Image (spheres, rainbow, N blue to C red):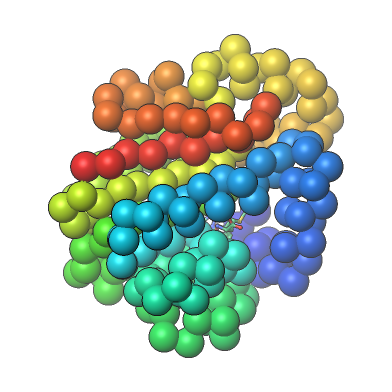
């Protein structure tokens, strides 16, 4: 599993490698742009103004929202990703910090209309995911939403089929969302699949 230094090294080539995997329709990023686009459209259509991005990376989605006048906040543990994203969004409130330890204090002081996490939370165990999402829900404004786009499956059987199909390329260290299992902790959560290996989990309060 990549640590913050690993993501520093990946920062420069990140957009290209994601783009290639998405264009070819293969694991792990098949469906990536469509998921980000869906989150973008939902936030704009609901006039959600403040957005917290968990693990924003190079800022692919956050920058688009920033350009639409959204107040962007975020946390990422890669110093290089923070620098890259901040250069594209000078007014955004971006912080370096490991979200497996929770949010930095500055981000805990605010409330948000939308909290987004794309391809970042699969570094947490399922128990950590649930406890983190529970804390994020408390930071939502009325009519706020959480959007999680990632390698994700409706059922464990679908995950296992994808693992077999992917073979050696499957990343054993990443812990992907299985909607039917995570939904037990969040009965109002919904799921839209975007490819054989990706989907959007979302929760409107
Ligand atoms: C695969 S990239 C996804 C970036 C972006 N959200 C996207 O959709 O393109 C994962 C990002 O999450 C960050 N990340 C992973 N684990 C993290 C952690 N425990 N705390 C903070 N950031 C983390 C990485 O530094 C990286 O920028």
Question: Would residue 89 be found to the left or right of residue 187 on screen?
Answer: right
Question: Would residue 55 be found to the left or right of residue 144 on screen?
Answer: right
Residue drawn at (31%, 67%), measured in percent from left and top?
Answer: 50
Question: Quick check: can you spot residue 166?
Answer: yes
In the image, residue 5 lies at what x, y percent?
64, 66
Question: Quick check: can you spot residue 5?
Answer: no
Q: Which residue is nearer to you in this view: 9 or 45? A: 45
Residue drawn at (62%, 17%), measured in percent from left and top?
Answer: 158
From this view, report whether residue 8 is shown above or below residue 120. Answer: below
From this view, report whether residue 72 is shown above or below residue 180. Answer: below
Q: Which residue is nearer to you in this view: 64 or 188? A: 64
Specify the quadrant of the image occupied by residue 79: bottom right
* Numbered marks: total: 0
Specify the quadrant of the image occupied by residue 187: top left
Q: Quadrant of the C terminus?
A: top left
Q: Residue reaching furthest front? A: 45
In the image, residue 22 lies at what x, y percent?
75, 46
Which quarter of the rendered image does ligand 1 occupy?
A: bottom right
Question: Would residue 16 be found to the left or right of residue 155 on screen?
Answer: right
In the image, residue 57 lies at what x, y percent?
58, 64
Q: Residue reaching furthest left? A: 142
Residue drawn at (54%, 62%), measured in percent from left and top?
Answer: 61
Question: Would residue 7 be found to the left or right of residue 146 on screen?
Answer: right
In the image, residue 188 lies at what x, y percent?
27, 29
Q: Which residue is nearer to you in this view: 102 or 145? A: 145
From this view, report whether residue 167 is shown above or below residue 56. Answer: above
Q: Residue reaching furthest top? A: 157
């Amino acid at each position: 599993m990549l640590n913050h230094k690993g993501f520093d090294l990946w920062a420069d080539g990140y957009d290209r490698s994601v783009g290639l995997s998405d264009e070819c329709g293969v694991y792990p990023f098949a469906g990536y742009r469509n998921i980000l686009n869906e989150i973008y459209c939902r936030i704009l259509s609901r006039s959600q103004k403040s957005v917290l991005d968990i693990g924003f990376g190079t800022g692919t989605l956050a920058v688009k929202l920033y350009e639409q006048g959204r107040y962007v906040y975020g946390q990422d543990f890669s110093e290089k990703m923070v620098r890259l994203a901040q250069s594209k969004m000078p007014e955004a409130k971006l912080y370096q910090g490991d979200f497996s330890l929770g949010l930095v204090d500055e981000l805990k002081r605010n409330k948000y209309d939308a909290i987004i996490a794309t391809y970042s939370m699969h570094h947490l165990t399922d128990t950590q995911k649930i406890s983190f999402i529970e804390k994020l829900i408390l930071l939502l404004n009325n009519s706020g939403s959480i959007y999680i786009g990632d390698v994700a499956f409706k059922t464990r059987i679908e995950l296992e089929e994808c693992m077999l199909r992917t073979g050696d390329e499957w990343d054993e260290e990443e812990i992907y969302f299985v909607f039917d299992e995570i939904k037990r902790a969040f009965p109002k959560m919904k799921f839209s699949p975007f490819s054989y290996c990706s989907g959007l989990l979302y929760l409107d309060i």
